[in-house]
């Protein structure tokens, strides 16, 4: 286990190594659960990846049919569009929403990626290339993988 993993519980049907998910936060049913502190130790709205499944003991859960399993999770890399001049592998950036005047609906998820908030401090871990021709106007962007 590395320093950037967290032990938590996840629905047994979702518990697959390498699987990405966005932690949505607490449900009303969670308040009455004795395992609540172990489940609710992630940040709502953030994207995580299952790094390792820790055994096969299934714990009962009021939310997940089939119970929950103990897993190690890490923050998941997020594909996003950033200003071309900032798209350098290894660079630390403060995430900013692109300031494009117009964009094609098909690139919405890259311009407004799930799990990333304006002002987040990230590291560029991979440059995937420029945005496709004609998809955005009014800005110069590259697609990158970011890690919080």
Image (cartoon, rainbow, N blue to C red):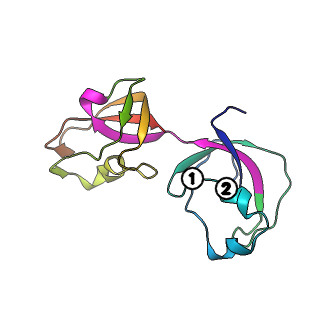
6 is higher (above) or lower (below) than 129? below
- Residue shown at the point (70%, 67%) measured from the top left: 64
Question: In x, y percent, where is residue 71?
Answer: 73, 47
Residues at marks 2 and 1 touching, judged by CB atoms closer than 8 Å: yes
Residue 53: image quadrant is top right
Q: CA distance from mark 2 to mark 1?
A: 8 Å
Q: Is residue 84 visible?
A: yes
**Looking at the rendered structure, which numbered label has been put on residue 21?**
1
- Residue shown at the point (82%, 62%) measured from the top left: 59
91 is higher (above) or lower (below) than 25? above
- Residue assigned mark 2: 14
Residue 50: image quadrant is top right
SS under mark 2: loop
Q: Is residue 57 left or right of residue 41?
A: right
Q: Residues within 10 Å of mark 1 (few under 14, many from 20)?
A: some
What span is colored magenta in the figure?
69-86
SS under mark 1: strand
Q: Is residue 85 left or right of residue 123?
A: left
Q: Is residue 12 visible?
A: no
Question: In x, y percent, where is residue 110?
Answer: 35, 46
- Residue shown at the point (23%, 52%) measured from the top left: 104
Residue 68: image quadrant is bottom right
Q: Quadrant of the image for the N terminus?
A: top right
Question: In x, y percent, where is residue 133?
Answer: 20, 38
């Amino acid at each position: 286990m590395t320093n950037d993993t967290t032990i938590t519980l996840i629905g047994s049907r979702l518990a697959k190594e390498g699987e990405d998910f966005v932690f949505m936060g607490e449900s009303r049913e969670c308040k009455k659960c004795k395992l609540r502190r172990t489940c609710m130790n992630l940040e709502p709205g953030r994207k995580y990846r299952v790094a390792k499944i820790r055994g096969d003991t299934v714990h009962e859960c009021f939310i997940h049919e089939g119970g929950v399993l103990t897993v190690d999770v890490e923050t998941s890399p997020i594909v996003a569009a950033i200003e071309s001049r900032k798209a350098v592998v290894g660079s630390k950036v403060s995430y900013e929403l692109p300031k494009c005047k117009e964009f094609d609906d098909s690139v919405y998820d890259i311009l407004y990626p799930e799990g990333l908030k304006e002002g987040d401090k990230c590291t560029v871990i991979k440059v995937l290339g420029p945005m496709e021709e004609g998809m955005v106007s009014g800005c110069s962007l590259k697609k990158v993988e970011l890690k919080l």
